Image: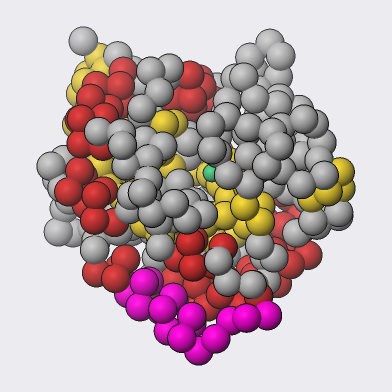
Amino acid sequence: MAGWMAAAPAADALAEEQTTSAGTVPIFDTHAHPGRGRHANLSRTASQGLNRMDHHGIVYTIFLPPPFPSEPRERYGARELASVVNEHPDRLAFAAGGESINVLIMSTPPASVTASALKQLAEDADAIARSGAKAIGEIAIEHLSSGRGRHPYESVPADHPLLFALVDAAARLDLPVDVHMEAVPADMPLPRAMGPANPPVLPGNITAFERLLDHNREARIIWAHAGWDNTLERTVPLMRTLLGRHPNLYMSIKVQPQGPQRNSPFAPDGSIKAGWLALLREFPDRFIIGTDQFYDDEDDDRLAAARRFIDGLPPDLAASVAHENARRLYRLAIRISIQAPR
Ligand SMILES: [Zn+2]
């Protein structure tokens, strides 16, 4: 593995990265979690995470809180993550809002949105921006419970008035929003047994999601977890249609070897599916990497899969998806220099 260095944030913002033909394309991981709850030692998992990042050629990681439904005991967010990443500003950053804005949205029915809830949301968003966060997330729209532990089911209409207010705030603050939403084109039965917290019927969400995207086209909305879906509805044709209609829509790619594979970018032989390659060619500036690695898991399978995915792309696409798009989308003033392989 080549030696990796991400120089401290440069004053001149988006400096050109150096590349070497022999080197591996460096990855910016825009979506990873230091732990499942506050009980995890966030600081230790983050600093141990640097070695794991190195191993997979990941030069920069944005940590974010999962979309907590409530449970204040376990929540962590801007405060905890700021202290973790501030020790390694050249390698780590954070997003926040899963611990605050997500809770507010989950606990407010769409018909009960008051002026004080809207004010609270705007204040939370302002606080996130002041904290130094690079994005707002992780925000749930349709989040299935895995059935493990107390992993929650969360669901709100994608055109919830507080989500409209959120994207307005994000546009005003120039921060992307990281959204978790199983694709449900129309009401459908729960596709497979996934745990008792999930309802028997999942509500359709794509039409309402398009209203959210159209509500404020200045807001950059990242639909997380492309390549991994539990409804088997997040197909290449669906993603192509939405990307074509909504210039403010971006997608972060998650590859989970143990997950449902139908819409994974990998063919059974490990190559990248032709349909996925065509989609990336059509929208080369709209995809980024978001591994969804939990650093309190010992298994690095999601990091390793992201590495294999980038290594399977043609070089120009690999650089765009691995780091160039993320750097632009998150306004990251990080310069990458790549040392020759040892
Ligand atoms: Zn997620």
Name the residue at the bottom extreme.
Answer: 115
Q: Which residues are magenta?
A: 111-126
Name the residue rendered at 45%, 65% in the picture.
Answer: 101
Q: Quadrant of residue 98?
A: bottom left
Residue drawn at point x = 71 percent, y = 43 percent = 198
Tell me, yes or no, if residue 14 can be seen here.
no
Q: Is residue 158 above or below residue 296?
A: below
Q: If the image is split into quadrants, where does the N terminus sit?
A: top left
Question: Residue at coordinates 24% horizontally, 63% vertically from top-left?
Answer: 131
Foreground pick, 274 / 97? 97
Residue 97 horizontal/vertical position (percent): 40, 60
What x and y, as percent, mark residue 196? 71, 37
Q: From the viewer's perspective, is residue 194 above or below residue 242? A: above
Q: Please tell me whether residue 253 belongs to the stretch shown in magenta.
A: no
Looking at the image, how many numbered discs can be counted on the residues? 0
Answer with left or right where residue 193 lies relative to residue 33: right
For residue 56, above or below residue 233: above
Residue in the picture at 47% in, 56% down: 70
